[in-house]
Amino acid sequence: MADVPSAALYRTVALIRGFEQRAIELVRSGVVLGGIHPYTGQEAIAAGTCAVLRPEDVITSTHRGHGHVLAKGADPARMMAELAGRTTGLNQGRGGSMHAADFGVGVLGANAIVGAGVPIAAGAAWAFRRAGSDRVAVGYFGDGAVSQGVVLETFNLAALWRVPVVLVCENNGFATSMRTADTVAGSILGRAAAFGIPARAVDGTDPEAVLDATAEAVARARAGGGPTLLECTTYRFDAHHTWEHTARPRYRTDAEVAAGRTRDPLEIQGARIPAAARAAIDAELGSLLDHAVRYARTGPHPDPATALDHLYATGLRGRAGAR
Amino acid sequence: MPKLSYLKALNRAIGDEMDRDGAVCVFGEDVGVAVTHATAGLLKRFGPDRVLDTPISEQAFTGFATGAALAGLRPLIEFQIPALLFLVFEQIANQAHKFSLMTGGQTRVPVTYLLPGSGSRESWAGQHSDHPYSLFAHVGVKTVVPATPSDAYGLLATAIRDDDPVVVFAPSGALGVREDLDFDRLVPVPLGVGRIHRSGSDVTVVAVGHLVHDALAVAEELAGSVSVEVFDPRSLFPFDWSGLAASLERTGRLVVVDDSNRSCGIGAEIVATAAEEMRLIAPPRRVTRPDGAVLPFARALDLACQPTRAQLRTAVEQAVNGHPSRSAE
């Protein structure tokens, strides 16, 4: 098992929670446009999985990606600046919340198309193995993505070619507003079984349970054993998207949300460390995130004349007058 | 001099680039046995680590290629059927193409998508006869359509070396073309540089892909009465607008022949841009597939939907003689 201190796991969970609380405030005050998909309640998965990964391992993320990106090591200040669309952001303001990427720490991008990051993670992992390295990739996706053909095609390819990828399904019970039971025939673990992929159900509210399961999957991948599916059961405390706070679609009851909130990764992991250690981490993160907000608010907005910069790696631009 | 076929030119380009750069690898269905011939001999020469037969999972292996490119490889995907591009449009247009911008330039996605046998293949019917290059040019994915063996070699080599996604359409109508040339003189051809196959002074015919050969035939037919310049853009995005403008400075008249559907097709873009920015002394004309066409099976019906030399000849004569007509399609 990976030797990760409980306090480090708590810190990651608390970092993600605090980051998103501030991000939601910035959405409401109009600093972050486009809104965000809060990860609140699901932090144990990002914290537990990324704790096992090395800096040179890579992940692909989802439209609900803040937790993964931060847990893999992206700078919270640059991440917040990206949400605010500033040139100081991770992607220079070109990606925003749903496309946050940091290749320097192995984040190959959050992805706004459900399931689309899964073949990309597997392709990167395949390239690592082909190069003779023991690097691995993690592809995150939600329960909604298991109905995407490309995800199941990737299961097949990854199993056939023994690709060192960990397939992490975050089952938060809802594909936007639709209950998993209404969108998934059979079971998610059964999908892995059909392809001969080892699979485990994991308590996705417990960072250490996620860490243990991931450590086993990553060890298998590094040893040439191919893919593993982890179905991490969790609960999204907040809205699907901050837009929901204004439209208020009703697809779950207050009682259900309250019941879900009783399994809080922050409290589960927080209870495992001394109160003084927890307080010290909270204080450290408080000032770190205050700085992130200041950094995001004060970063420069991009110059409209640079709207097409980075469109092509080789610098191709549209002809003059075409925009 | 030896003769080089178009298909063999594609095959040589892939092999030469794999030789030159160990990061180049090939994905595709039945590439091991080279069903389309474009990958003939590559498995034996480079081994199964670099030439990978894939399951019939176009979306997954196209997404795989993006991931492999992010991890440092330079995959080439061969698709047996051009309509499969509709299936993987997400993975190309929405993923590979957008990564560079969305990440603020943190990465590049050097994947080549090769379509050996694009367009009508003599009654392969509705789902095997598309020529969807205009879709990719519209999105802004680099899009090339070589007409000759040497250009097929040169443009495919450039596409493989390019750090961005590039779709290479090899029209089935051009696959049989052969060219006398010295193999030592096969060189990469830059994207965005057109080629004048025949100089003329009365009218510029912009011909895409295999239609270059039809345009040359029509130019020869009309040689006594009309001086036709045949301009092959070679890549549709980027497009050689300055090359076209220079040609129109000489001729002032424009006909575009393009084997794709009329509405929002590349032909419309060429005509519109010429009308906005270039010298025209007569209304420009387009010869295309019908609006919204799906190619029917029966041979006569298939042919009825493709641009013909007769239509092109009529359009050229109308452009030169000024007879108004809206019938040319």
Image (cartoon, coloured by chain):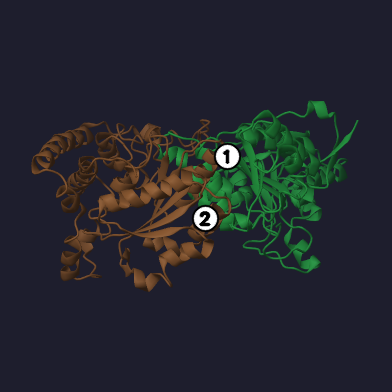
Say which residue appears at 88% left-offset and 41% top-offset: B224
| Mark toward the viewer: 2 or 1 | 1
Residue B9 located left or right of residue A139: right
Residue at image position (25%, 70%) is: A251
**Callouts 2 and 1 on one subunit:** yes
The disc placed on residue B72 is none
Position of the C terminus of chain A, as image quadrant, is top left
Q: Residue under label 2, please give it.
A: A154
Q: Please, which chain is the residue tagged with disc 2 on?
A: A
What letter labels the chain drawn in brown? A
Image coordinates of residue B11 in percent, x first then y, are 76, 40
Residue that protrudes farthest toward the right in the picture: B1
Three-letter residue code for mark 1? Arg
Q: Quadrant of the N terminus of chain A?
A: top left
Residue B320 vertical position relative to residue A299 in the rendered view, above or below: below
2 and 1 marks in contact (CB < 8 Å): no
Q: Name the quadrant containing residue B101.
A: top left
Left or right position of B233 against A322 = right
> Judging from the image, what is the letter of the chain drawn in green?
B
Identity of the residue furthest to the top in this view: B184
Q: Residues within 10 Å of mark 2 (few under 14, many from 20)?
A: many
Give me the C-alpha separation between circle 2 and circle 1: 17 Å
Q: Chain of mark 1?
A: A
Please report whichever mark, 2 or 1, sits nearer to the chain's N-terminal start: 1
Residue in the foreground of this view, choosing between A44 and A315? A44
Residue B172: x and y, percent? 76, 51
Q: Please give left or right for residue B80 compared with residue A103 in the image.
A: right
Q: Position of residue B29 (x, y in %)?
A: 67, 53
Residue A163 position, x and y percent, is 52, 48
A185 or A244, nearer to the observer: A185
Check disc 2 and give the amino acid type. Answer: Thr
The label shown at residue A130 is 1
